Image (cartoon, rainbow, N blue to C red):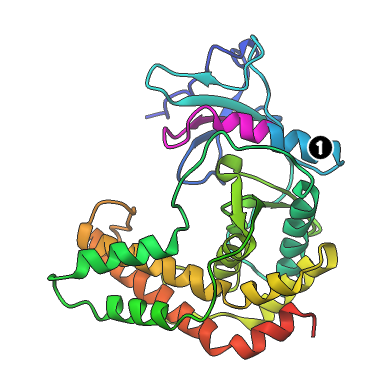
Amino acid sequence: MSAAPAPRPAAWRALAEARLDDCADAGLINHTWLVGSPPRFVVQRVNVLFKPEVHEDIEAVTAHLAGRALCTPRLVRTDSGALCAVADDGAAWRVMEFVPGVTVHKIDSASRAFEAGALVARFHAAVDSLEWEYRHVRPGAHDTVAHMQSLERVVQGGPALPVAEGILAGWRAWPGSLEHPTRHAHGDLKISNLRFDEAGRGLCLLDLDTLSRLSLDVELGDAWRSWCNPVGEDGLDTRLDLEIFAAAVGGYRRERSLSPAEIHSLTFAVERIALELAARFCRDVVEDRYFGWNATRFESRPAHNLFRAQGQLSLARSAAAQRSKIAPLLEGR
């Protein structure tokens, strides 16, 4: 049986006869098609988690980047000039320019980590001068205190979960601070959201629905948590790989300097975000309602999330054990 034809939103007449193919590198949130062969545009049906106003944010940031001669995908307006088209169920359709290049799903070398760090730093340096109030905001996405309090509530009076005790103990012992200034941020710097050229140099950031203001330790802590763990989220023996970390920091510092305050906050950043994600996974062990799960490897969502929580706790402990080595790398020593 042949696959169903790709939908063609009527707001762009040019799509009526265009070739649309499923995008092999698409993420899990938005359904994505490529237009043309070779591709020229990307069509997405945006998850209802992201309101249409998010496209005002994307337009503001990408226009700012383009004005500074940085590569970035731009929105293609509808025939009537709108940034997106809203379906009857409230979901938005959008068309964006396709940026040729390479997508990777795991850091495969120190040189890749260096280029990833440099790309993110160029983005941060460019948006430092942006004046914009975000229209689409996800409150509490990285409220670590609230995530820990939620974990405490759901495990009280329930079955004993040693991993929950370990997460909460790790958080109580965490020596960092949460009082940091916010800045323009991408918000989801997993490596598959970075585009590289064939030579391995960073081109641009993709998947811009999470643009917002975040503290630098949240932005880079989440990136490094993902990039510098060679095992990935579905492993137990997770660790912070200092060689990859050093390369990522080196690339970042080449393009944007770090202040003493930023260096101090970043020393504890991976540990913070790993504990935060561990708490969220562990909470879903009890509530069994949020994260997707792999039914081919695990018997249930709680079983998969328990495994994930254990892995992120292991990563946080690895970062904690290497604090004395992390700080000099951030200082360029």
Q: Give, as a single range, the part of the protein colored magenta.
A: 43-59
Residue 126 placement (x, y as % from top left): 80, 48
Q: Residue at x 47, y 57 (%)?
A: 142
Q: Tell me residue 72's x, y (percent).
A: 75, 40
- From the image, which quarter does the N terminus lie in? top left
State the SS at label 1. helix
Q: Is 273 rendered above or below residue 245?
A: above
Location of residue 304 in the rendering, given as x and y in whole percent from the top left corner? 30, 65
Q: Report the residue marked by disc 1.
A: 66
Q: Can residue 221 be seen? A: yes
Q: Residues within 10 Å of mark 1 (few under 14, many from 20)?
A: some
Residue found 78% across the figure and 73% down from its top: 250
Q: In the image, what residue type sits under mark 1?
A: Ala
In the rendered view, does 315 fall on the left or right side of 211? left
Q: Residue, x 57% and y 26% (percent of image)?
A: 94
Left or right position of 62 against 178: right
Of the 4 image quadrants, the one containing the C terminus is: bottom right
Q: Nearer the viewer, residue 172 or 61?
A: 172
The answer to if 154 sits in the magenta stretch is no
Identify whether 128 is placed above or below 33: below
Quick check: 128 left or right of 77?
right
The structure residue drawn at horizontal position 62% and vertical position 26%, both measured from the top left corner, is 95
Residue 181 spot, x, y in % from top left: 64, 59
Q: Residue furthest right?
A: 69
Q: Quadrant of residue 156?
A: bottom left
Residue 242, image quadrant: bottom right
Q: Is residue 275 above or below residue 91?
A: below
Residue 106 occupies quadrant: bottom right
Q: Verify whether residue 44 appears in magenta.
A: yes
